[in-house]
Amino acid sequence: MRINGKQKIVLIIVAMIILSMLLFPPLVFRKAGVYFDCGYDFLFYIRKGNYPFPSCMVNESQLFIQWIGVLILGCLAFFLTSDKRDK
């Protein structure tokens, strides 16, 4: 199977989305065993001790689920843009 131009574009877009999700991950903070949403922030400038969120951390499970969703949609787009002539 050869990769055509449309498939290359799909791969580049999926890679850019995953990279941007890595650079701006979902954040949460924990208080009394309950997790509260901090939104999204730049990975190298995560809020530490700022009001109203005392200390935010990356929500790895949400980030992983988002990556899985992007990869599933990316695979679907990749195969839908394949040439019909390929066997």
Image (spheres, rainbow, N blue to C red):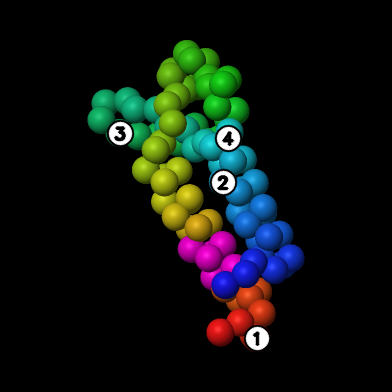
Q: Earlier in the sequence, mark 4 or mark 2?
A: 2
Q: Main secondary structure of the magenta part?
A: helix
Q: Which residues are magenta?
A: 72-78
Q: State the CA–CA distance, disc 4 to disc 3.
A: 22 Å
Quadrant that contains the C terminus: bottom right
Residue mark closest to the camera, 1 vs 4: 1
Q: Secondary structure at mark 2?
A: helix
- Whether residue 45 is situated above or below residue 9 in the rendered picture: above
Residue mark closest to the camera, 2 vs 1: 1
Q: Secondary structure at mark 3?
A: strand
Choose between 55 and 42: the one closer to the eye. 42
Which residue position holds label 4?
Answer: 24
Q: Are marks 4 and 2 in contact (CB under 8 Å)?
A: no
Q: State the CA–CA distance, disc 2 to disc 1.
A: 30 Å
Q: State the CA–CA distance, disc 4 to disc 2.
A: 10 Å
Which residue position holds label 3?
Answer: 34
Which residue position holds label 1?
Answer: 85
